[in-house]
Image (cartoon, coloured by chain):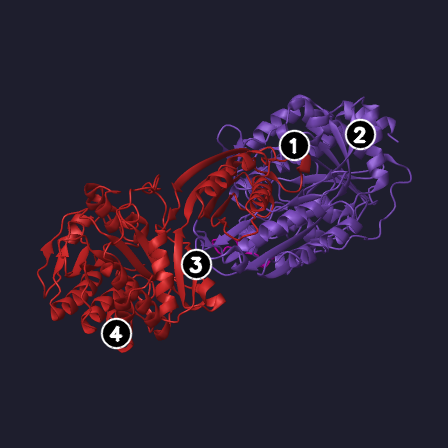
Chain colours: A purple, B red
Amino acid sequence: MTSEVGVRAARAVDGDRLWERHEQLRAIGALGATGVSREAFTQEDFEARGLVCSWAAERGFPVHVDGIGNLFIRRPGQEDALAPIVTGSHLDTQPAAGAFDGAFGVLAAFEALEALDGASVPTRRPVEVAIWANEEGSRFQPTTMGSAVYVGALSLEEALASTDSAGISVRQALRQQDLSPLPPGRREFGVPFAAYVEAHIEQGPILERVDVPIGAVTAIQGLRWFTIRVTGQAAHAGTTPMGARRDAVAASVAMIHELSRAMTDTEDRVRFTVGRFEVSPNSPNTIPSTVVFTVDFRHPDASALARLGDQVAPICMANTCGCTVSVSETMNAAPTILDAAITETIRDTARALALDCVDIVSGATHDAKQMALACPTGMIFIPCREGISHSVLEHAERHQMLAGARVLTGAVATLASDPAGPGPLPPSSPPLQGRSKDTDDQDY
Amino acid sequence: MTSEVGVRAARAVDGDRLWERHEQLRAIGALGATGVSREAFTQEDFEARGLVCSWAAERGFPVHVDGIGNLFIRRPGQEDALAPIVTGSHLDTQPAAGAFDGAFGVLAAFEALEALDGASVPTRRPVEVAIWANEEGSRFQPTTMGSAVYVGALSLEEALASTDSAGISVRQALRQQDLSPLPPGRREFGVPFAAYVEAHIEQGPILERVDVPIGAVTAIQGLRWFTIRVTGQAAHAGTTPMGARRDAVAASVAMIHELSRAMTDTEDRVRFTVGRFEVSPNSPNTIPSTVVFTVDFRHPDASALARLGDQVAPICMANTCGCTVSVSETMNAAPTILDAAITETIRDTARALALDCVDIVSGATHDAKQMALACPTGMIFIPCREGISHSVLEHAERHQMLAGARVLTGAVATLASDPAGPGPLPPSSPPLQGRSKDTDDQDY
């Protein structure tokens, strides 16, 4: 159900202002003509966060910051002691990234505050923009650090002790934080939210392919990572009969072939990737002695994630071709089912605004995955060109950003105006488990 | 047929002398307790060649050297103007090698001369020991350089111009050659041989597995090398549906799986190896954009080498999984069928000496492959432990070396005493074609 105030606020979203601010943000850490480099807790990251704080100051919205650097920009509600409806995303980027991942969600969230003010729409609950610290995890691991600490899935001490490749800790980096012109107030961790809604580019090709402007995200898929080490014996490729070989590449190919067959589904919900494959001694005329390869397996359904993921080790063990094999699971993160009522509000809002909308599963992880541990949570996706993300080629059109900001604004206004409001959600999804410390790309 | 003089000469082979000389040679370039490092045209190589020349001087056997450094030690025949029966191998090694590859063939050949003298067996034809220069090709490419120049398969100019990683040319390295105490005579290239017989460790596990001391080598298998480049598109492992992927690893696995099926034979004559497999960007959660892998395919039968090898490109092209694929053939060397009459003489000699003997195909290339272009050629294999070669773990037992030297001596004595002698062989095998210049391991 979309409230009348939701539609009114959504129509007050200003596409010119949204695009103008997008351009201003993109200039901070600009990389070439289209890219951005703005890793977490760098001067560029602080500058970008300061810019949004300056927009808040212009509007008189108070800003709060917590101990890991998450920012909260607040528009008061009529019943201001109620838990807020929160929307937001992050401003940090991968080292060579685009201007949309994270930034769009912050811009759309701030535009929701602007539109509520511009349309003179009061809301029963306060509405807050959250700017989560260090979502990307490229400089400091783990990913979604700020939101994870906020909900208690990661300890503050562990987060502050994380160091970058130069040995600088989060604790040290945070001391450089300058969010002038506004000295923000302090916020404790874990202050309850009534609901959380995040807008984001899809980072995949589905919405573009079906030519639909809005995705109502029903779930963030679960993820299991495996590292498989296959040990055979190096020998001469010319003199060793096939039957006498222990060929680590031959065994690995047999394993991956069978894994691919097992992972085939008719609904195209499985995601199965062998992204790393390293051979030793890697010489054309030597039978390979060792292969190490990775499996990245994702599924939105917890039972399928368990059932198919549990087949990885047995399938590898059944295709050793005389080699010895070890399979270690380096990560196991359960799927997150987003709140059905919020997803329905997103669909209704799109319908009220005459925007096509399809249900979609998020392939990547977002701050919303952490927030879903603590409150009813929803996500809105907009298309991005060719599904490309984490690249200077990342792109979304102005009209696509506008449509997404409108749906977000309408949904937030509706949720904040609901006389009953969403009830509290008992935490159902466990925090990310077994996060590997030695992976070189922490953006899952 | 084995002549009576063949058996008499074979019985004169001295196992103690053979092993003593093996130990003397191993000390030159010794690497640890069992290994040898004696690359071509190094001081160690020259010193090893000089040691054998000193044994020749003690016996009064004249020594000749040609323009690429091949050495020929001669025991005259009764009809000394006839073309000689030649036996030999090489003394250079891989950088971290064993004491048997090449050296055993030279020691057994020199022992044949000693045994003929010791048993006072005159031969109709002269018998020569050839020490071929730079068989390994690890320092200066290509492999089998000396024998290839001798038979005209490689030009002397090209060989002399070959440089090592320090920029030193073969021409420069040869100037350091010191074969004292004997100033050798000069030998022209291409002086005809009546026959060539080479003894060698198998460098594979077959003789050890069947527990037979002598292999009568019927052929040196042919070899085709391919490099396959698969180009897909990098994308996020979490957000990209399986149907929208162009996954270079998935395509490569499909290709190798089908290639392996196509290369399966019931006779175990095919040798099929994917030794190199390189992935980019090689990150667990990124769909791979490129894979480059190699195929090393060998077969003793020319028609099978052509028929199966010609399937490599079509099979790759039929399993692209949406990627683009290029297949380039980097080497195509025809099989060498060794001389049937000489192989029969080897079998007969083993039988006459009460040594078990099986037919075997050589998986590796040897100087005999070059010699087969110019004269009737045979090879004798002895077992080596676990088939290991090009390793400090390479090992053959003293009694295995003795058996091989006896069969070689008997066969050489028989061939050199044959009143008719082997006829000339028209060159039937083409020289090695398309030898790749950019491979980092030249020992095929």
Please check whether the numbered discs 1 and 2 fall on a single chain.
yes
Q: Amino acid at mark 2?
A: Gly
Element type at mark 4: loop
Please check whether the numbered discs 2 and 3 fall on a single chain.
no
Q: Amino acid at mark 1?
A: Glu
Please check whether the numbered discs 4 and 1 fall on a single chain.
no
**Observer able to see residue A222:** yes
Residue A183 appears at what percent x and percent y? 62, 44
The label nearer to you, 1 versus 3, is: 3
Q: What residue is shown with label 4?
A: B12
Please check whether the numbered discs 1 and 3 fall on a single chain.
no
Give the magenta part as a residue range. Answer: A160-169
Element type at mark 3: strand
Label 1 marks which chain's residue?
A: A
* Left or right, residue A428 beside residue A30: right
Please check whether the numbered discs 2 and 4 fall on a single chain.
no
Element type at mark 2: helix
Q: What residue is shown with label 3?
A: B359
Nearest the eye: B235 or B289: B289
- Neighbour tally class for label 2: few under 14, some 14-19, many 20 plus, Cα within 10 Å: many
Gap between marks 2 and 4 measured at Cα: 103 Å
Q: Amino acid at mark 3?
A: Asp
Q: Amino acid at mark 4?
A: Ala
- Neighbour tally class for label 3: few under 14, some 14-19, many 20 plus, Cα within 10 Å: some
Label 3 marks which chain's residue?
A: B
Q: What residue is shown with label 1?
A: A58
Residue A142 appears at what percent x and percent y? 62, 52
Query: Extreme bottom residue here?
Result: B16
- The answer to if A111 sits in the magenta stretch is no
